[in-house]
Every structure is written in C-alpha cells, then in structure tokens.
Amino acid sequence: MKKSKKGLTAIIILLIAAVLPLVVTQSYYQHLMILVLIWVIIGSSWNLLAGYTGQVSFGHAAFFGIGAYTAGILNTKLALSPWWGMAFGGFSAVIMGLVIGYLCFRLRGPYFALATLATGEILRLIANNWVDFTEGMVGILIMQTFVSKLPYYYIILCIAAGCIGVIYLVMNSKWGYYFVSIREDQDAAESLGINTTLYKNVSLMISSFFTGTAGAFYMNYMGFIDPSVVFSLHNISIQSILVGIIGGVATLWGPALGGLVMVGIQELFRSAIFGLAPKWVSQGHAMAFGLLVVLTILFMSNGLVGDWPKIKKIFIRKTLKEIS
Amino acid sequence: MSIFEAQNLVKYFGGLGAVNGVSFQVEKGEIFGLIGPNGSGKTTVFNLINNYYPLTSGDIFFKGKSIKGLKTHTICHLGIARTFQVVKPLARMTVLDNVVASAFCRFNTIKEAQKQAMEAIKFCGLEAYRDQRAKGLPIGLRKRLEITRALATQPELILLDETAAGLNPKELDQAIALIKEINSRGVTVIIVEHIMKVIMTISNRILAINHGQPITEGTPEQISRNPEVIKAYLGEEYAQG
C-alpha cells in the first residue's frame, strides 16, 4: 500500500515534469528547468555518496568537470559527436572516481572530505594548465546540436529519472543496507562481513557516473566550458552539498527539491526579483542561499524532505489556531 | 580436532607489548573463557583474531587453516563473528535493519535476509524492539543487539566481548541463558568477561592472562584456586568464597 503510493507520487511528478515544457514555452523558463534537472542529478549523486554512504565529498566538481571535458575533448580532438561524449562522460568520471577512491578512501570522515576537496582543485588546475589538451582557460566551444530547448529538456529528464530510479533500487537492496551500515559505523560494518572498501567504491562509482553524465550533458547543452565553470569549487562542489542539505541528506527526493529551491533562488535574485527590486539585489543570490542553508541547519537539520512531518505539523497547528 | 587455535600471538603498539605470547586452542562446541585484569590484553586478542589490528607475530588457525592477514570482513564470511565491548550499534537504523545488514553476509535478497534476521531477533528476544532505532535502546538491549547481529551472520565461532558488563542481575541471568542457548546450537564461543558469575558458570575452560601474557589455563575450579590468578586478578576474597 505504502509502496504503491510512493510509486504513484513518482509517476505523477514524472508526468508533470514531462508536460511542463509544453505548457511553459518561454525558452528562459525551459532553460531554468534544465538547470534544475542538472542539479537534481548532481545533488542526488552527491547524496548517494555523502548522505547514504556517509563519505562526504567536497569535490564533486571533479566528476562533473571530467564528464564535461570528456565530451568536449572527444569533440575537438577526435571530432566525435558530443553525444558520444555523453556516453563516455559518465564512464571517464567513474574511472576518475576509482582513482580518487583508491587514494582518498584510506582516510575517514573530515580527512576524506578534505582529500576530495583537494582532488577537485587539482583537476581544475590541470585543466587550466594543460593547454595542449584542454585548451586551458580559453575553454572549449562546440556547436550545439539543437536550437530548441525541448530535446535537451527531455534528455536530461530521462537521465534525472534514471538517476533517482537507480538510487531508489540500490537503496532498497543489499547495497543500500551496506551503504548505510558503513555510514553508521565503519568498524562494525567491517566485522559484520561487509567489505567496506569495495562498497564505498561502488557508491562512489554510481555517484560519479551520474555526475559525469550530467557534466557531459552540460557540455552539449551550453556549448561552452572552461575549467573555472565545470571544475568550480563553489559553484559545483559546494553547491552540491548545499543542495543536499537544504533538500534533506539521505532522503530520496531531498536533493531534487534542493535543486529546485537553489535554482529558483539563484534566478530570483539574479533577475533582481524579476526586475521589481533595485539592481543591487542581484548581487545577493549567493548570500540568500547561504542564509537559507544556515536557517535550514538551525531549524530543520534534516532538510525540507527529511523534516517534512515537522513542517506539516507546524502548518496544521497554524490552521487549527485560525479555525478556533 | 580443535576448531580454533591461536599460536603465540604478539601485538606491539610501538614499544608497548599489549599481547605477548598468548596461545590457546578451542575445541568445537566449547565455551572458552578469557579473563584477566583491566588492560591485560583480552580485547586486543579479539581484535587480533578478526584482524581489526594486524598481528606483530604469531599465527591464527580456524578449522585448520591460517587466517592470519585476512581482511576483517573475509574472516566474518569464514564463520567468525564478534561483538564489541564498547557497543557499536548502527545508531540511526532500526533493530531489524541492523540485523538485516549483517544477515546479508549469507544471503543476497532482502526477503531471505529479513527472514534470517527475524529468526535471530526472535532467538535473542528482541521482537518487541524490532522497529525501534538502535540509538534509543538501553545498554542491556544494545549489548543483546550486538549478539543478535553477530548471530545473523551464521557464525561457527562467536567472540563475545564483555556482553554482560553493565547488565542488572535479571538481565545477567538472561544473558547467561542466551549464551548457553547459542552454544547448544553448536556455535563455539570464546568469551571475555569480568563478571565471575557469568564466566565461572558457563565456561568449559578458562585462560587467565595478565600483562599480555598467559598465567594459566584450566577448568573454572582450577582457575579459581590458582594462587597466581588470585593474586593478579580475583583477590583473596573470591577465592575463598
């Protein structure tokens, strides 16, 4: 009963998402919807590794960037269609993930987080300086395939749905139990017969695959990347953490909602509340998002989805008060 | 043939010899006790057995094969399960999920693992707490959860590390009954315990260690009469009583 209700909710959300761009036809809003979906993927992937498996990554830009650069470089160097890049982007991110996992999973907790932070930055510097291969700071420019946003929207929607679907299936299997066990106590997990090194890497592989695929899609969609965009510490690595925190760490839909909130706030401020507010407001989007994170941590430490019952209670109490 | 054999275990942490030349054999179906004063190296012996710490030297045999240097999780798959003295519940998981996670050691599908976990939970009398989070359980039940989890991996040898410490007298009797029940199912038990009531009533044989070195090995009566054990650990009073 409960399961079928959950499935129904998912189908309804998917249907709404599928119909939405047919209703909202302005390309600006379609662009925002695509951005939201990209963040749904990055946030959910981050959440699988950090939220469920407990291995907090400060360097998810590494996978995003690798995916994007795989698509870009295959196109500029080998003249392969960037859509091939999308097929390979995820896999090259997985390979990078295994390298990072091999190096960083010897460390635990905050040390692991710092190590991932460093690897993300190292990759950005490599992309900046290995000019022959990556074009350096100039970045990579490719021709976009479609003029319309619609094809892009449906492609990224499929990837996002696939991402959430895979995470749902994984978390309801042996792997999911193992991931959470590792988060709760790595030593106990190990002595319960769980190969913690293996399963941490499995989690990282799934996470990096989807993040890399999102990166490759970004290359296709935007047509331009440079190291400071796709390997960005604050715009990718840190944002992916914030998306998770606001939506709810270790919840299936949390990062998806977090992505929606984040892109919403960002654009609200960037456009100075649709031009209604004075122009300096547009400088404040990072601060507004930061404030939201602070408030979330203070008052709803489980995020919007994680603390949903709590939020519902407050609203119900309010309406009850009004009635009486 | 003995199911388990420790040969001359040595563990140094830097210059400190925590365990220094401990050897013992455990027969199949036995309850083997390990006693000694605080800091004598009992828990370190357990940590050496499942390779939580690597051995400095020595060797460990399980069912005739050396398990020295094997990964902790591999040792669990071979059939040696352990509990922790300082309990390590998977805090934000329910009791059932805690046990299911360890039941996956032998099963691959959720259904089978849940069935196995429920059996272990019933066996240990935790049904009433099945859906509670492990975090909120009192210490007695958390200790019991440790045992339940270890049992769900279907071990042939179980290492119990002070599972009776901190329990009240009633819980203590239940713990003794549970350990006996586990043993009667054919699981060999090695137990570390400070509470003499537990260790003296259930052990077939006991090894007493001090400063990481064995003092003596024998039946509970032999141990309780041994002057060295009395001097190092039990104290005069217990020996007379």
Image (spheres, rainbow, N blue to C red):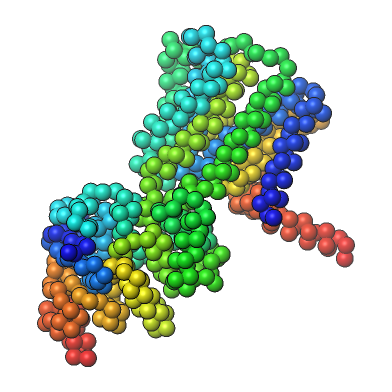
For residue A286, side relative to residue A198 (left or right): right
> Is A99 above or below relative to A105?
above
Q: Residue at x 49, y 50 (%)?
A: B109
Viewer-nearest residue: B44 or B189: B189
> Is A32 above or below relative to A7?
above
Q: Residue at x 53, y 66 (%)?
A: B130
Quadrant (top left, top right, bottom left, bottom right) of the N terminus of chain A: bottom right
Quadrant (top left, top right, bottom left, bottom right) of the C terminus of chain A: bottom right
Viewer-nearest residue: B15 or B235: B235
Q: Is residue B47 visible?
A: yes
For residue A306, side relative to residue A233 (left or right): right
Viewer-nearest residue: A142 or A126: A142
Q: Position of residue B37 (x, y in %)?
A: 22, 73
> Is A69 above or below relative to B32?
above
Viewer-nearest residue: A50 or B81: B81
Q: Position of residue A259 (x, y in %)?
A: 65, 37
Q: Is residue A290 visible?
A: no
